[in-house]
C-alpha cells in the first residue's frame, strides 16, 4: 500500500447505499479477517463457520446481514450479501500502480499485433503474431498467447497461462498417429479471468470460445472447440475435453472432468471431483465425487463395490 | 492463411487414392465443420453425433464412409476412415511460415547444446546445458528444457512445458525430509508431441523415457523413471507416478491417475478419471470413473457406498 | 559429472556410520539401479518389488537391511533405512556447478527486491517488486514470483512455478461476477521444495503459508489462504481449495482434492485420487480412490452404484 486510505462508517454507508449501525465517524484504514482485525480494520461476516471469530472480533466495522445484528453488537454495515458488499468496498483499498510502463520491456511482443493502449503485459510474456488484446486487459508474467488469439476487454490473465496451443487432434494411421492440423483460434470475451498455468487450446476448424465474464481458476484445461457460456465459473484443476459446449451461469467445482462432444445446459452446478460424460439438459446440481473415509473402512467398501453387480444378483436370488 | 489454396474433387481423389462421387471439378479453398461449411469448403463426417449437421451441410465436398452415401447426396470423397483422410488432406491447407528465424532471438539457449539446424525454438524458451534437439523439432514459447535432456526428431513441444525438472525423490530422516539427488535425464523419442504446461521429470538414476510417437495432451504429469512405450496417447490432466512402465499403443483418457512402480501392458485403454495402482497384464479396456448424476440421488447412493460393507453383511444375515 | 569421484566401502561405512560386509577396499565411482549397476557402482535395495534385481545385480556395493544379508552375498552397507542412507550418500556424487553467475542474466528481477547473495535464479524467471528470497535458494527457469512473495532459506522452486497470483475470489452481483481484491501474499518456509508448474495463490486478506520443509510435487494447486504445516509432502496433481489448513507431517498422494475451509490434523495420510471435503480431526490414513477394473465389469458395478439407494431399499423389503 503506497498511501493509507481512510473511510468512515458513514462514508461507506452512503457510497454503497447500505444501512449502518454504530458511531458514524468510526474510521477504518485497512481490511482484515474477523480473527485478525484491529480497531481500524473493516471486516465481514458471510460464512457461519466463522461465527466464533465474529464473537471475538476487534474489527472497527463489520459488514453483516440484518439477522446477525443481535449476535454482534459493534459498528456495522448491513447488507443482504455481505461478501458482495465487501468485494465492492475492498476495491477502495487497493492501490493503483501508476507511472509504470504498461508493456514490460522484457515482454516479447510480435510486431503485427493489436494491443490496446490501456492493456498491460508482464515480463517474459510472449504475444505472437495476429493476437489482439482489448482495453484495460491485465496480462501477467510468462504468459503465452499463440498466433491469432483474440482477447476482449478487461480480461485478466494470470502468469504461466497458455492460450492457443494446438488442440490434441490425432488420427490413427495403421500403426502410428498423424497430427490433425489445428486451424482455428481462441476468442476470450470481455471480463474473463484465467488462472495461473491454465491452458486453452485453439480450435481444430473453428474457434475455442469463452463468452463474457467466464472465470477460470488455476491449472484448468480447456480443449479445442470448447464453448463456455457467459458468467460460468470453473474452479482449479478442472479438465474439459474437446468440442464440448457449456452453458451460461454454470459452476464447476474443483478437479472435475467434463467429457468431449457433450452439451451442458445453463445454470448447471457440478460438485467437486465429478465426471460428466453425457449431456446435461436441465439446470441443477450434479455430482459423483466420493468423500474420503478412514482407509480400512474404505478398502472394505471398495472391495464390495468392485463386485457389486454379482453381489446384488446373488442377494436377489 | 497467406494465400488461398484451391483443390478440385478430382485432384484430391487422385492424390489420396480415394473414390469420389459428384462433379470432379468441384472446387474447395478451405476447411470447415459440416455445420459452418460453405460451398467452397471441404468437410468430413466421422462421428454419428453430427448426423443432423450432415443432413443440412452446405459443404462443397464431404469426406465420408461408403455406408453414408445413401444419407448424403452431394459431392464426396469416400474413405473407410474419414477422419484420417481429412487429417492427411488438411495438411495441404496449412500454410508454411518461411523466412522466420528458427531460433527466436529471445529464446535463451546455453552455449553447450546440440540443436539441429532445422529445429525451431520459441521466444522465452530456456534450453539448458547439454540438451540435444533433433531435426525438424518445433519447440514453442516459454518452454524449459533442463540440463542434458535429449529430444528426438520431429518432436513438437507446446508452450509452458517443463522437461527435466528434478523428480519428487525424498527420504524421511527422523523428523524431516532430505532430498534424493535426481541424476538421470529425460529422453524423448522421434515424433512425440507434448501438450502445453505438461511436465516430465528427470530420472533418479536412469532416464525417464518416452519412446517414439508418444502423444501427451496438456497438463500431463510424468514422474521420474517412467517409461512410456511407442505410439501411446495420453489425454489432458493425467498423472503418472514414478518408475511406472506403460506399454505401446496404450490410450489413457483424461484426468486418470496411474500409480507408481507398476507395469501396464501394450494396447491397454484406460477410460476417463480412472485410477490404476496395480499392474495390468492384458490388453483391453479398464476403468473406474464414476459418471455424475443429479446431486440428491448421488448423495443418497454415496451414503450407501460409504457403509456398503456393513449393509451387505447385514443383508446376508 | 565433471570429475569421477571414487569412494571405498570402508570410507562410506565410516563417513555414514554404517556397518559393512565384504572387501573394505571395494571401490565405487557412480550410482545405479540394481538392474543396471556395474561393478564400480553403488546401489540400494529398499523395495521388495525389486528382489529379482537384487538376485542378479552386478553392483559393487549394495545398501540393504540386515535381514537381507542372507539373500544377497556381495559387498554391502547395512542400514535400517537403505533409501535414506542412499539419499545421504548420493549427495557425494552430485557435482557442484561453480563459477556460474547465480542470477542468470536473462532473469527479470525488479529493482526493489531482497535476494540473498547465495540464491540462484534461472533464465526467464520473473521476480516482481517486494519479493524476498533467502540464502541458498535455487529458483529454476521461467518461474514467476509475484509482488511481495516471501521465500525462506534453502527453498527449491522448479521451472514454471507461479507463486502469488491472485486467488480465485469472486462475488456474484445479480447477473455477473465481481472480483474480490486479493490483498495478502505468500510465505514459503525454509527447506520447502515446489515442483514444476505448480501454483500457489496469494491470500485474500492474510497470507497463504507453507511452513518449513513442505514438499510439493509438480502441477499442485494451492489456493488462497491455505496453510500447510511443516514437513507435509504433497504428490503431483493435487488441488487444495481456499482457506484450508493442513497439519504437519501429512502426506497427500497424487491427484487428490482437498476442499475449502476445512482443517486436517497432523500426521494424516490421504491415499491417491481421494476427495476430502470435511475436516479430519485424527491422524491416520483416509481415502476414497476407486481402483480400475476391466471396463465391462466396472460398467456393471457402476450401473448398480448409480441406483444403490433404491436397490438396498428394495432388498430390505
Image: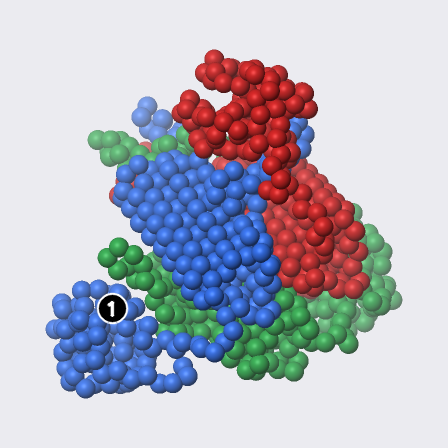
Chain colours: A red, B green, C blue
Q: Nearer the viewer, residue A214 or C86?
A: C86
Q: Nearer the viewer, residue A130 or B216?
A: A130
Secondary element under disc 1, as helix, strand or loop, is helix
* Label 1 sits on residue: C85
Q: Is residue A312 visible?
A: no
Q: Is residue C157 left or right of residue C175?
A: left
- The spot of residue A267 in percent (x, y) is 62, 32
Residue at x 61% of width, y 50% of height: A158
- The spot of residue A255 in percent (x, y) is 49, 46
Q: Is residue A192 above or below residue C4?
A: above
Residue at x 60% of width, y 18% of height: A24
Quarter in which the N terminus of chain B is drawn: bottom right
Q: Is residue A121 left or right of residue B275?
A: right
Q: Is residue C12 left or right of residue A122?
A: left
Q: Is residue C268 left or right of residue A26?
A: left
- The spot of residue C37 in percent (x, y) is 30, 80
Residue at x 36% of width, y 61% of height: B260
Q: Is residue C259 above or below residue C2?
A: above
- The spot of residue A16 in percent (x, y) is 66, 24
Dividing the picture into quadrants, the one containing residue C154 is bottom left
Q: Nearer the viewer, residue A151 or C10?
A: C10
Dividing the picture into quadrants, the one containing residue A308 is top left
Q: Is residue A103 above or below residue C24?
A: above
> Label 1 is found on which chain of the structure?
C
Amino acid at each position: 500500500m503506497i498511501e493509507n486510505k481512510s473511510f468512515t462508517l458513514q462514508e461507506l454507508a452512503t457510497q454503497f447505499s447500505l444501512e449502518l449501525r454504530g458511531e458514524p465517524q468510526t474510521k477504518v484504514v485497512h481490511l482484515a479477517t474477523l480473527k485478525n482485525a484491529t480497531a481500524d480494520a473493516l471486516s465481514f461476516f458471510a460464512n457461519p463457520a466463522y461465527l466464533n471469530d465474529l464473537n471475538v472480533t476487534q474489527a472497527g466495522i463489520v459488514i453483516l446481514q440484518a439477522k446477525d445484528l443481535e449476535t454482534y453488537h459493534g459498528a456495522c454495515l448491513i447488507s443482504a450479501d455481505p461478501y458482495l458488499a465487501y468485494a465492492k468496498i475492498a476495491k477502495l483499498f487497493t492501490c493503483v500502480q501508476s507511472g509504470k510502463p504498461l508493456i514490460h520491456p522484457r515482454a516479447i511482443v510480435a510486431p503485427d499485433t493489436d494491443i490496446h493502449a490501456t492493456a498491460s503485459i508482464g515480463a517474459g510474456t510472449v504475444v505472437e503474431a495476429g493476437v489482439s488484446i482489448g482495453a484495460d486487459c491485465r496480462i501477467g508474467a510468462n504468459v503465452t498467447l499463440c498466433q491469432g488469439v483474440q482477447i476482449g476487454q478487461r480480461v485478466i490473465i494470470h502468469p504461466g497461462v497458455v492460450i492457443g496451443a494446438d488442440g490434441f487432434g490425432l488420427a490413427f494411421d495403421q500403426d502410428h498417429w498423424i497430427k490433425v492440423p489445428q486451424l482455428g483460434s481462441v476468442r476470450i470475451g470481455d471480463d474473463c479471468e484465467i488462472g495461473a498455468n491454465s491452458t486453452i487450446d485453439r480450435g481444430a476448424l473453428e474457434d475455442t470460445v469463452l463468452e463474457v465474464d467466464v472465470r477460470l481458476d488455476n491449472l484448468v484445461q480447456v480443449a479445442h472447440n470448447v464453448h463456455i457460456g457467459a458468467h460460468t465459473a470453473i474452479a482449479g484443476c478442472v479438465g474439459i475435453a474437446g468440442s464440448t459446449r457449456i452453458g451460461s451461469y454454470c459452476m464447476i467445482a474443483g478437479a472435475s472432468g467434463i467429457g468431449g462432444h457433450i452439451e451442458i445446459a445453463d445454470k448447471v452446478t457440478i460438485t467437486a471431483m465429478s465426471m460428466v460424460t453425457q449431456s446435461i439438459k436441465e439446470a441443477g446440481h450434479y455430482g459423483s465425487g466420493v468423500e474420503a473415509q478412514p482407509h480400512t473402512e474404505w478398502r472394505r467398501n471398495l472391495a464390495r463395490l468392485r463386485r457389486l453387480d454379482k453381489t446384488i444378483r446373488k442377494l436377489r436370488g
